[in-house]
Image (spheres, rainbow, N blue to C red):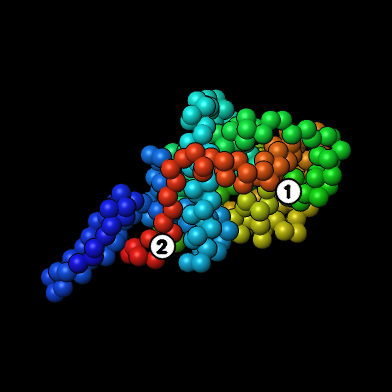
């Protein structure tokens, strides 16, 4: 059986599994990897953080990267403990505004797309809110500990020039469309395609595409209308392909998707544009402040670790299964 010291017993919360063939063999499946006073992070918490980072970067977190990940988590917990001591808080309004800003920065158009993005990152909305809240608290604590770090407009403009790609909105198009459904067994596919081709021919011969679409919609033969202005990169592949060479006013040939037979008209093309400096100035300032605070982070955390009870057990990530 595994013998453990009294100190280790205080550091670890373990669950052991025993097989019928070897009842004496036990494996650690959960343990406390980081403890800062009464705050803890378990092996599951660390794996969750590793999965989130992997989803963000598109690369798995290797075993040799875990010590760094754990060290960063310990630093964060020290700062959150200090923020709690100072009774720093984040209001619901601040948190909601920060979440909305994240959506806008990542061009997430609606709630469904937002939920999918979170799912792909291995996050829930509740988990994201907790993460954003912690980030705000850490930033607020650093400002409290370090004071104001003056930033000039000239410095922000230099950063703006370096990071213009981050503030570039990709090509957008304004579209009108119609989709005509096709039966599951595709028995009416040929007839639907023929009807779509007649509509295209009528529109290209001088007919009003919007009016023609409305006639089909009112007759119950399709759904459609104004799609608004959308990023080309947000479109489904078949739509991007259909409009790739279309100029404003031109109409696509009919094309198919699982939803049915589509026709689109390009109303306007908006080339990639860079957001104005004044529009992103506050965002630039926030990023610059965050970078400057991070540069002073180690000294702040070092002082906190002298005051707090801090234990770190990265070796547990090699023992868990």
What secondary structure is marked by label 2? loop
Residue 255: give x, y in percent of width and height.
60, 59
Question: Where is residue 277, by image quadrant?
Answer: top right
For the C terminus, the image quarter is bottom left
Question: Where is residue 145, by image quadrant?
Answer: top right
Residue 206 vertical position relative to residue 147 in the rendered view, above or below: below
**Foreground of the two, 196 or 173:** 173
Q: Is residue 244 left or right of residue 312?
A: right
Residue hosting label 1: 166
Q: Is residue 21 left or right of residue 262?
A: left
Callout 1 touching callout 2 (CB < 8 Å): no
Residue 233: give x, y in percent of width and height.
66, 53
- Report if residue 128 is visible in the image: no
Looking at the image, which residue is at 50% across and 49% down? Answer: 73
Q: Is residue 285 left or right of residue 220?
A: right
Q: Which mark sits nearer the N-terminus, 1 or 2?
A: 1
Residue 215: give x, y in percent of width and height.
59, 40
Mark 1 and mark 2: Cα distance apart in space: 38 Å
What secondary structure is marked by label 1? helix
Looking at the image, which residue is at 24% across and 63% down? Answer: 3
């Amino acid at each position: 059986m595994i013998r453990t010291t009294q100190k280790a017993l205080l550091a670890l919360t373990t669950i052991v599994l025993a097989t019928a063939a070897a009842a004496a063999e036990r494996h650690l499946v959960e343990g406390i990897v980081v403890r800062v006073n009464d705050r803890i992070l378990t092996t599951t918490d660390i794996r969750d953080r590793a999965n989130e980072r992997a989803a963000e970067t598109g690369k798995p977190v290797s075993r040799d990267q875990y010590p760094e990940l754990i060290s960063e988590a310990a630093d964060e917990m020290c700062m959150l403990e200090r923020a709690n001591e100072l009774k720093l808080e984040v209001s619901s309004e601040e948190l909601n505004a920060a979440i909305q800003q994240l959506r806008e920065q990542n061009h997430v158009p609606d709630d469904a797309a937002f939920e999918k993005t979170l799912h792909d990152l291995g996050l829930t909305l509740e988990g994201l809110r907790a993460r954003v809240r912690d980030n705000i608290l850490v930033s607020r604590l650093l400002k409290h500990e370090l004071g104001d770090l003056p930033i000039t407009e000239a410095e922000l403009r230099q950063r703006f020039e370096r990071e213009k790609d981050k503030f570039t909105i990709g090509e957008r198009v304004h579209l009108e469309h119609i989709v005509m459904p096709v039966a599951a067994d595709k028995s009416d596919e040929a007839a639907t395609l023929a009807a779509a081709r007649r509509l295209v021919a009528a529109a290209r011969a001088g007919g009003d595409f919007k009016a023609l679409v409305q006639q089909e919609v009112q007759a119950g033969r399709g759904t459609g209308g104004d799609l608004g202005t959308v990023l080309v990169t947000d479109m489904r592949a078949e739509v991007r392909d259909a409009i790739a060479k279309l100029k404003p006013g031109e109409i696509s040939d009919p094309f198919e998707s699982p939803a049915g037979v589509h026709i689109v008209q390009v109303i306007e093309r908006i080339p990639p544009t860079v957001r104005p400096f004044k529009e992103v100035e506050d965002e630039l300032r926030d990023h610059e402040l965050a970078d400057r605070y991070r540069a002073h982070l180690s000294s702040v955390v070092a002082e906190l670790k002298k005051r707090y009870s801090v234990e770190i057990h990265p070796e547990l990530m090699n023992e868990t299964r």
